[in-house]
Amino acid sequence: MSTQDADSGSAAGTDEQTTTAMDSDATANETVIDISDLTFGYTATPVVEDVSLTIDPGEYVAIVGPNGSGKSTLMQLMLGLLEPDTGTAHLFGERADRFDDGERVGYVAQQASAAKEMPITVREVVKMGRFPHVGFGRLSSEDWAIVDDALATVGMSAFADRRVTQLSGGQRQRAFIARALASEADLLVLDEPTVGVDAESVDAFYDLLAALNAEGITVLLIEHDLGAVVEHADRVVCLNREVYFDGPTDEFVESDALARAFGTEARFLTGVDG
């Protein structure tokens, strides 16, 4: 190889490293969710109105609000499952309703109720997380290793061959978090995931979310349990059709958003005095 070729190869390698580094920085700085002036209604009456917020990588954000406040609707708009009447919603820099990189988002629904009647094992549930990567083809040894790692992370390895119908509510939710982990999701979205789950399992569940968030996964939690939100989330978005508060959890507890959005019983519900 001539000196010129060597220099050229070295320059190419440097350029490739620079490009990789730039791509890594871009991913690290990429906004996960960005919605602006968003309004949506199933009828002429808006369910969410003039909502704007941004969620950055690594955040742990809880959306709270009374029943019928538009929490789940807002989540669907964020994920592109609904198209806003006005305003914009972007997911990882793309229009949410056109976003198709499903492997980046893991979703855990309320009680994963549909799974209660599914005659499949926990490992088969978690295996579904690899489908965005391999389609419905055969999983490689590497894919199966990722499935097993996800089961271990959520403490469900011992239940891998148990049918989902035989699990408790807390175990079922862990299985579906494992499915999201197996997809190697950057964003974990949970819609009131502890409904019907016993108190001991709820504590373990939130410990797991905190550990996952500490590893860099962005967590978006819709939760009815204000006490759990105050204890675990870093940031709270308080919604009742419009945003009443968006900021650090400790500031939310001290704000009047509780009374305005929830009514006079809200402070009692959080377990926080005056």
Image (cartoon, helix red, strand yellow):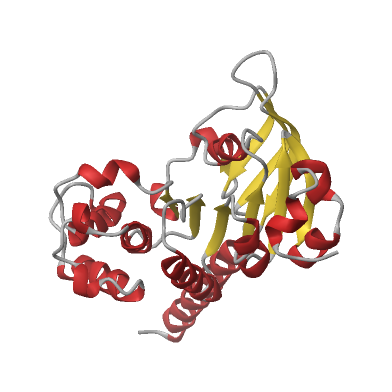
Q: Which residue is painted at 16% across and 57% down in the image?
A: 163
Position of residue 180 in the picture relative to residue 159 (left or right): right
Which of the two residues, 72 or 201, is positioned nearer the viewer here? 201
Which of the two residues, 13 or 32, is positioned nearer the viewer here? 32
Q: Looking at the rendering, in which quadrant would you find the N terminus?
A: bottom left
**39 vs 208: above or below:** above
Q: Position of residue 127 (x, y in %)?
A: 22, 58
Position of residue 19 in the picture relative to residue 253 (left or right): left
Q: Which residue is painted at 45% across and 67% down in the image?
A: 205
Q: Position of residue 202 (x, y in %)?
A: 46, 65
**28 vs 194: above or below:** below
Number of labelled discs? 0
Q: Looking at the rendering, in which quadrant would you find the C terminus?
A: bottom right
Q: Position of residue 31 (x, y in %)?
A: 64, 55
**203 vs 270: above or below:** below
**184 vs 43: above or below:** below
Q: Furthest residue to the top?
A: 44
Position of residue 132 in the picture relative to residue 260 (left or right): left
